[in-house]
Amino acid sequence: MAEPLTILNIGGHPKDAILYAGGTMAKHAARGDHVCIMTPTTGLSHHLAAIKEYRDSGEMPNMGDLVAERKRELVDAAAELGVSDVRFLGYNDEIMLPREDMISDIADIIGEIRPNVIVTHWPYDTVPAHAVTTQMTLLAIDAASGIRPGKPYAPTGGDTGGEAAQIFYHTHVGRTNVLENLTIRIPTTVIDITDTIHQKATAMNKFTSQHYGEDSPLQRKLSEGMDGTGAATHLRVSYAESFVAHNPEVYEYLPVSEYRRKLSKRSPEEVLRAMTRMEL
Ligand SMILES: [Zn+2]
């Protein structure tokens, strides 16, 4: 096998890195790749349980406790995927704007772990924390490829800067509106996550501050809708996460994946079984 990859998987809010790429991360962790999950924000403005409590009681909750809870949820969820490297930068997401200190923190992580692959939100996602996180990540990649006095230095490895050979953007829409309909995301890269869908489900159910949990149908509904249809159905697998590659990939020869060739050898019955399988 090739040298293990180092993957930096970023979500604007704590749960996003897992919601959009958790199944893929579980596969890479199991293969022996180094996966780091990072979120710049506390995600506190979206602590839905606390918002409801505040609305009902009129009493402001203890913000420190809520931040600790959100961090614990992410650490627990990552552990379900076999990922122990979790970076929770802890910035307020009440009003999300690119900030130099956040960009510098992200650049520090890039300089430290030197990711070969960065996974993050679609740059034009209409959820502000998502798009801003990607803008900051691109700025951080550039910063990390230069000299930063006293800071970890990631040598330039191409036009993405740093050693990030590739950046993958999520393809799922953050909010459905006319802007997003005008910029349709056509996946370049689809990962079959059928064998990690239960791990992803267990991980997502750790986010109880956002109405996930074993007793809640939210995870099942979202995952069947997001991972179980779309790209999965078109490519004849049961569950998939899909991405858009930032750079065209470079090969020595025209590429067809071994996995795709294996899938194409299935019988029509096996294909139908894969397409219609529901695990959740
Ligand atoms: Zn989010």
Image (cartoon, rainbow, N blue to C red):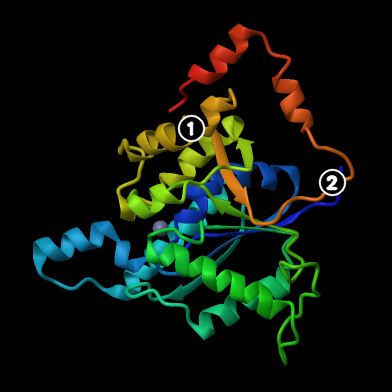
Viewer-side residue, 122 vs 275? 122
Q: Which residue lies furthest to the bottom in this view?
A: 149
71 vs 26, left or right, is left
Which residue occupies the foreground of this view, 246 or 178?
178
Q: Is mark 1 on a helix, strand or loop?
A: loop
Dot 1 corresponds to which residue? 230
The label on residue 192 is none
Residue positioned 51% across, 61% down in the render: 123
Relative to the observer, which residue lies in front, 4 or 124? 124
Percent across and percent down for residue 113 are 72, 68
Residue 51 in the image: state x and y as whole percent. Answer: 21, 62
Amino acid at dot 2? Tyr
Q: Which amino acid does label 1 sit on?
A: Gly
Secondary structure at numbered mark 2 = loop
* Disc 2 within 8 angstroms of ligand 1 (CB): no
> Which quadrant: the N terminus?
top right
The image quadrant that residue 246 belongs to is: bottom right
The quadrant where ligand 1 appears is: bottom left
Q: CA–CA distance between discs 2 and 1?
A: 27 Å
Which corner quadrant holds the C terminus? top left
What x and y, as percent, mark residue 74? 47, 58
Q: Residues within 10 Å of mark 1 (few under 14, many from 20)?
A: some
Whichever of callouts 2 and 1 sits on the residue coming sooner in the sequence is 1
Of residue 49 and residue 273, the one placed in the foreground of this image is 273
Q: Is residue 49 above or below residue 105?
A: above
Q: Residue 87 sits in which quadrant?
A: bottom right
Q: Residue at x 67, y 76 (%)?
A: 142
Q: Name the residue under label 2.
A: 251
Is 52 positioned to the left or the right of 235 in the image?
Answer: left
